[in-house]
Amino acid sequence: MSSRIYDCIAAIADVIEENKDFLTDLDREIGDADHGVNMARGFHAVKEKLPKDDPDIGAALKKTGMTLLSTVGGASGPLYGTAYMDAGKVAAGKTELTAEDFGEMLKAAIAGIQKRGKAERGEKTMLDSLIPAYETYTEKVAGGADLVTALEAACEEARKGIEFTKTIRATKGRASYLAERSIGHQDPGATSATLTLETILKFLKG
Amino acid sequence: MKKLINEVDNVVNEMLDGMVAACPKYVKRLPGLEVLVRAGGSNGKVALVSGGGSGHEPSHGGFVGKGMLDGAVAGAVFTSPTPDQVYEAIKAANGGKGVLLVIKNYTGDVMNFEMAADMARDEGIEVDQVVVADDVAVENSTWTTGRRGIAGTIFVHKLAGACAEAGGDLAAVKAVAEKVIANVRSMGMAIDACTVPAAGKKSFDLAEDEIEIGIGIHGEPGTHREKMSTVNGISDQLLDKILAEGIYNSGDEVCVLVNGMGGTPLMELYVANNHIKDVLAEKGIKIYKTIVGNYMTSLDMEGFSITLLKLDDEMKKLLDAPADTPAFVQF
């Protein structure tokens, strides 16, 4: 039988594959038309390489990050690769996660993305979904919410973050070359990040 | 989509093997990797390693050889290679005198190459890097990632490569690369977009009478669109932006590169050059050397870029030094 963490990451892989063309089309508008293709290639490799029966969440995330790093390329490879590896460090040895654990993992993932991408919120990147999602998540958990309830609210904020990216011009990444022409388009990275959170939520809700 | 390919996912792999088969004298492929290195190795000199997404052929594998690069890493089409591949290229190219990475200024390229450099340094290999950002279409401000690296990169390969071949140490080779970067500017345009095999459709849509000015080399849209005009008019526009940099002044000597984007007939590149030479003559800018051809392409994109490199005596010598690579031979 496969472990919960394997099933969860496999679910993310499936959603990325299902949205491959959608993500690539978004990237075609303001980037270089490869986000979906690259992410799908990476997660295809993750599904093949990840041990099915190891319940260690940290180990699975580390392996996922390293695989993405060596298969995705572009900017998404180092960014998502770092995010998964850094989240994995927080979850090292764990086979169950508390609401607080998940918050710490999200925090580590965001910090990793910021360090690697030298980016801040408001630059039309995945951080525009992830940071508000994380803030809402920790607020909810501090107020006593369980992981699923807090993540539900976080996903809502992540979706709002996507909408927000439509209103601003990109100042990081390849979309920044378009200047004002990037306004009106949603950020592919914010979209794939939100899809990831939504898939984790859906998985936890069973 | 009509393409002369087999499996979309196997294009880069088959291309690299095909290149090695065509040029065994120059390059060999590291087994299982998307990396080409010099067939004869690079012992005893500073090594230059470059690379980027595929689709820019002959860049960068075509410039691996005497007087230019020691290693080239090929990512998926228009996608930066991954750190593990770059790391293997650094290790294989290192001839004991250190390695200079020549990176084009794209978010992904810089991140992946920097991660690889960190990995190599952990192993005790001396690694330094330069980032080429010659595209004047993109404003260099706090609002962007910085200017893109495009065709001017070829001159970094050529001049820094010549310095390394002549025995320059890592600091000297890097200094030459930085000098080229400071003195090279480019700008490109397209009359039609390219088609990435995995995407299967054109990377942007242009009306029959529309052109895109300020394009990059990854099928990304440019800075603006306008109506089709003559190549003289288009060249004027590209040159205006390049000359507005204030680098190239009356009395200066330059090397001109008229670079095809992959789908442009050489005839049209020469027509463009015929006007470029007149404009530069009018400005009193002396052309020391002109290179016309496909050096930094964007798959099948129809269009071209103009690059100017300002030269001093040291740079002229390095530009004229012999080079023997699949895509650039000079005796």
Image (cartoon, coloured by chain):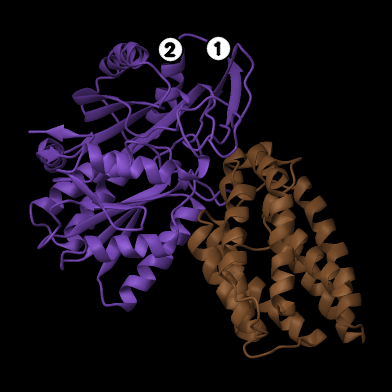
* Depth check, front residue: B155 or B59: B59
Q: Which quarter shows the C terminus of chain A?
A: bottom right
In the figure, the purple chain has which letter? Answer: B
Q: Does residue B244 appear in the picture of this structure?
A: no
Q: Quadrant of residue A114?
A: bottom right
Q: Which residue is mark 1?
A: B228
Q: Using the image, determine if residue B95 lies above or below residue B203.
A: below
The residue lying toward the viewer, choosing from B141 and A203, is A203
Which residue is under mark 2? B231
Determine the secondary structure under disc 1.
loop
Q: How many marks?
A: 2
Tag 1 near tag 2, CB within 8 Å: no
Distance from the alpha carbon under mark 1 to that under mark 2: 9 Å
User: Residue at position x 78%, y 53% from top?
Assistant: A162
Task: Please identify the quarter of the rendering in which residue B81 is found.
Answer: bottom left
The x and y percentages for residue A77 are: 54, 60
Locate residue B120 relative to residue B326 in the image: left or right: right
Are tags 1 and 2 found on a single chain?
Answer: yes
Hey, what amino acid is under mark 2?
Val
Q: Is residue B268 above or below residue B152?
A: above
User: In this picture, is A114 found above or below B252?
Assistant: below
> What's the chain of the residue with tag 2?
B
Callout 2 environment at 10 Å: few (<14), some (14 to 19), or many (20+)?
some
**Residue A107, position in %: x, y?**
69, 77
Q: Position of residue B3 (x, y in %)?
A: 49, 27
The colour one sees for chain A in the rendered image is: brown
Secondary structure at badge 2 equals helix
Q: Residues within 10 Å of mark 1 (few under 14, many from 20)?
A: some
